[in-house]
Amino acid sequence: MALATPALELVGLRKQYGEHLAVGNVSLAVPKGSLLTLLGPSGCGKSTLLRMIAGFIKPDSGSISIEGQDVTALLPERRPTAMVFQSYALFPHMSVFDNVAFGLKLRKLSSAQRRAKVEATLALVRMESFAERFPSELSGGQQQRVALARCLVIEPQILLLDEPFGALDRHLREEMQVELRKLQRQLGITMLVVTHDQDEAFILSDVVAVMNGGRIEQLATPADLYDRPATCFVARFMGIPNVLPGTAVHYQGKPTFRHEKGALIGLGQDTNIVAGEMAHLALRPETLRLVPPADDQADMTGTLVFVTLIGSRLQYEVDLGWTTLQVVMPRAEQTWQPGQSVGIAIDRRHAIVLSA
């Protein structure tokens, strides 16, 4: 059976500015109706990649195909895409209705057709009662909905969003993330979103492409990205502060990680390691527990040096002498004080061994 044509296919896409490689030979296929997030720090190439897909930046080499059609040489207005910018880019002198109708007017739709489509799209984003207002009379969240409606009304094959929630406060940003995900599933439209926010990527995505230095470091579902980061960069970027360098060994017949300072940390029996290989051990703070230093479950001992309140949890910083680890535990559990000797118990099921 023939494979379905992807909504978007990039082959060897590259862009360089002088000595700076912005995007390096990126190849990617996005299935129809899915939401892909380009995730990474500032300067990693994610916005450049999005703008090449939109047609605003010409690639040095490589190709861009949308539903099987090569669009690499097409101008932005000739591509079946629409883009929501971080600034929303609404026309300040136009009403909400006219902003949304703008693209339809360029496409020569009749007045009756424009009105029907605009009203239906404003209802979709719950902005129908604001049709006569101007952008300056709207909140940030309302402006974001209008910008989204202006793109959706022209029925693009692919919707591109560049940091669409960056200008919103935290509560509204989280609300809009969920709304966008629900809307994407309702419409079945293919979307690409650029963000530097890991939580946003997890909420929105079917698949996440983590970018670093102009290249895709890992392409995975949110669950796989969380459970099985492929590299040290991805592990740290996904919020794992405890990444220890060392060597994979077998000790007393068991898979073991030997820290470069000599400490031995036992691993689960199903851990895939090759004895003698350089490796890193990634330990999420929430998979560690503080226990009394003499407890049988203590895998290592150290001194508690700092405690930070994070809502319903406490974050502990423990100095082991050869490194410092962060441990996160519920506030309801035993409260430990700075200066105390403590043990750290590792949940080996969630210890992640990374290639060096």
Image (cartoon, rainbow, N blue to C red):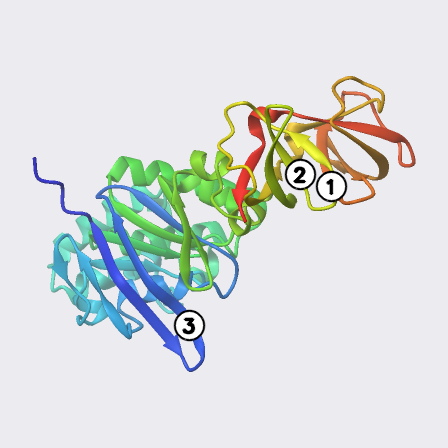
Contact (CB < 8 A) between labels 1 and 2?
A: yes
**Mark 1, other Cα within 10 Å: few <14 / some 14–19 / many ≥20:** few
Residue 312 visible from this viewpoint? no
- Please name the amino acid that badge 2 sits on: Arg
Q: Residue at x 13, y 42 (%)?
A: 4
- Please name the amino acid that badge 1 sits on: Gly
Looking at the image, the residue that sits furthest to the right is 339
Front: mark 3 or 1: 1
Looking at the image, the residue that sits furthest to the top is 296
Callout 3 secondary element: strand
Q: Which residue is mark 1?
A: 262
Using the numbered discs, state the Cα–Cα distance from disc 1 to disc 2 in whole angstroms: 6 Å
Residue 170 visible from this viewpoint? yes
- x, y percent for residue 188: 24, 39
**Mark 2, other Cα within 10 Å: few <14 / some 14–19 / many ≥20:** many
Which of marks 1 and 3 precedes in the sequence?
3
